Image (tube, rainbow, N blue to C red):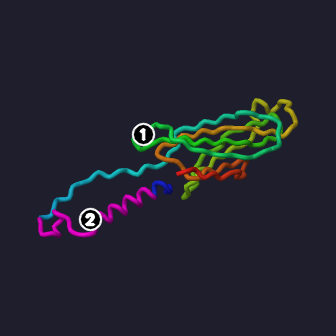
Amino acid sequence: MKRRALLASVGAATTGLLAGCTGTAPGDGSDGSPSATPTDTPTSTPCSTELTSKAFEVQSVECGTGENSADASVDPTGASTADGTTYTVTVTGTIDGSDACHTARLRRVEPVPDDDTLRVVVESHVPESKESSVCSQCIVDIDYRATLEFSCGYYGVVEVVHDGETVAEVPLPE
């Protein structure tokens, strides 16, 4: 369960459990008055974080130092759904490639089971259209941007993986 949803449900449950426990209330039968008939109260369905869209863009491919780094941020989009506010998680990074034919692609976006972590997997690769091309022989730095839209919350940590290696674990603000 996500940490934010867990804290919200624990707080609501604790308040509900403690309400009316400090004495008698009129109409509950404990003060000698007739008991009130319980009424059905609507219960809210817990909201679960869901990826609603994703976009990936390579911003540049240039000879460089073979850097591998990443960062992440989150912003509410201002849009609301029946389940709650939507959020945009933006991951920016640099992944290396072994020559100028390499580019980057978003391989996977997945929650880590039983954790408040979102794993974003990016890989360096040679597109099929460039497999037989002659390319500049230099280590390249490939700058990219991934934009991920979520409804009903977001994950507390973004783990960014480049070609099988974790390069960043970025905690997002509450």
Q: Could you tell me which secondary element the residue under label 2 belongs to?
A: loop
Quadrant hosting residue 146: top right
Mark 2 residue crowding within 10 angstroms, few (<14) / some (14–19) / many (20+)? few
Q: Where does residue 118 sit, x and y in percent of width and height? A: 59, 50
- Magenta segment boundaries in residue numbering: 7-33
| Mark identifier at residue 20 | 2
Image coordinates of residue 58 in percent, x first then y, are 70, 34
Residue occupying the point 11% across, 64% down: 34
Q: Which picture quadrant has residue 85?
A: top left
Judging depth in this view, the residue of 34 and 120 nearest the camera is: 34
Q: Residue at x 51, y 40 (%)?
A: 52
Q: Secondary structure at mark 1?
A: strand
**Mark in the foreground, 1 or 2:** 2
Q: Which mark is residue 11?
A: none
Q: Is residue 30 left or right of residue 145?
A: left
Answer left or right for 94 relative to 7. Answer: right
Is 123 rendered above or below residue 57? below
Residue 149 appears in which quarter of the rendering?
top right
Q: Is residue 19 magenta?
A: yes
The single residue placed furthest to the right in the displayed view is 137
Give the x, y percent position of residue 76. Answer: 51, 41
Query: Disc 2 residue type?
Result: Gly
Which residue does the numbered mark 1 point to in the structure image?
81
* Nearer to us in this view, 162 or 143: 143
- Label 1: few (<14), some or many (≥20) within 10 Å? few
- Count of marks overlaid on the render: 2
Q: The residue under label 1 is which amino acid type?
A: Thr
Lower position in the chain sequence, tag 1 or tag 2: 2
Q: Is residue 169 left or right of residue 68?
A: left
